[in-house]
Amino acid sequence: MNQENLYLSLRVEKAEFFLDHEDPDGFLHPIQGEILGYDEADRQRKLGRFRVFQVDLDGGLEAGFGPLDVLDGRQETSVFIPLFSARGAGFSTTVMRLCHNDLLYQNLLVIDRVEILPRYRGQGLGAQVVKGLIWKFRQGAGLAVLKAFPLQFEYLHEHPGAKVEQWRRKMGLDGLPKDEAKATRSLKAFYASLGFMALPRTSLMIANLAWKLP
């Protein structure tokens, strides 16, 4: 299927918006689903899947929870604690410097997973999906953030089971490059082309949503 004949869609399969604002977890909103493609005959293909988190840090502050309290609620979001000062009062000086002190909101959009099946790679679909996720779920967020970690090096012991193994085989992860440092550099370069900036000495990357992204 040629890229120019493929129309992309995101289908949300699961979204959680906890109503307990007496718990910092209530300000973490995971959204996951499928990446779909339609050809000119309107035939649907599953291209992959995604997961993002909308992190309502401003709401957390109103309820008395600092950014570190909210982010620590889940493993997927706790990795972004270094974006904030040690006291958790605001973004770190490094983040502010990268963003030229131009940040409108403290809320985050976490791009947690973008998985494209092998037969659809190399067509620029990954970039389209990342841009689409930002466009669709950016409301109220000051930064889009991610951890640049190639999927083939992900540990599976946290999510065991036949379904995970089946998806891993379907994704062809065992056939991807084995050099982790090189694969990580390549992934960072990909996200840099979309407007993300690397946080020095980490695998974290940020995009200022107040700016026009490529």
Image (tube, rainbow, N blue to C red):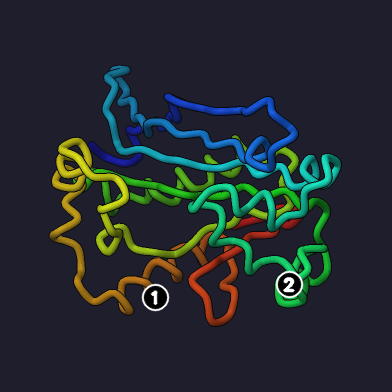
Marks 2/1: CA–CA distance = 28 Å
Q: Relative to 164, does residue 176 appear above or below in the rendering?
A: below
Q: In this view, does 168 lie above or below 145?
A: above
Label 1 SS: helix
Give the total of numbered labels.
2
> Looking at this rendering, what residue extends furthest in the front direction?
22
- Which residue appears farthest toward the top when viewing the image? 42
* Residue at the spot of label 2: 86
- The local secondary structure at tag 2 comes to loop
Q: For residue 27, which quarter of the picture? A: top right
Task: Give the x, y percent position of residue 115.
Answer: 34, 46
Q: Earlier in the sequence, mark 2 or mark 1?
A: 2
Q: What residue type is labelled 1?
A: Arg
Tell me where residue 162 appears, x and y as whole percent.
15, 38
Q: In the displayed structure, does residue 178 sit left or right of residue 189?
A: left
Q: Nearer the viewer, mark 2 or mark 1?
A: 2
Q: Which residue is painted at 19% across and 47% down in the image?
A: 168
The structure residue drawn at horizontal position 20% and vertical position 36%, both measured from the top left corner, is 163
- Residue 148: % across, % down: 44, 64
The residue under label 1 is 185
**Which of the 4 image quarters holds residue 186?**
bottom left
Residue 144 has which mark?
none
Q: Residues within 10 Å of mark 1 (few under 14, many from 20)?
A: some
Left or right: 57 as drawn, with respect to 51 = right
Residue 47 image position (x, y, % from top left): 29, 36
User: Which residue corresponds to the image point at 14% horizontal and 46% vertical from the top-left?
Assistant: 169
Foreground residue among 12 and 46: 12
* Vertical order, 37 against 193 (above or below): above
Q: Quadrant of the N terminus?
A: top left
Quarter of the C terminus within the rendering: bottom right
How packed mark 2 is, by other alpha carbons closer than 10 Å (few <14, some 14-19, many 20 or more), is few
Q: Answer yes or no: do the residues labelled 2 and 1 have beta carbons within 8 Å? A: no
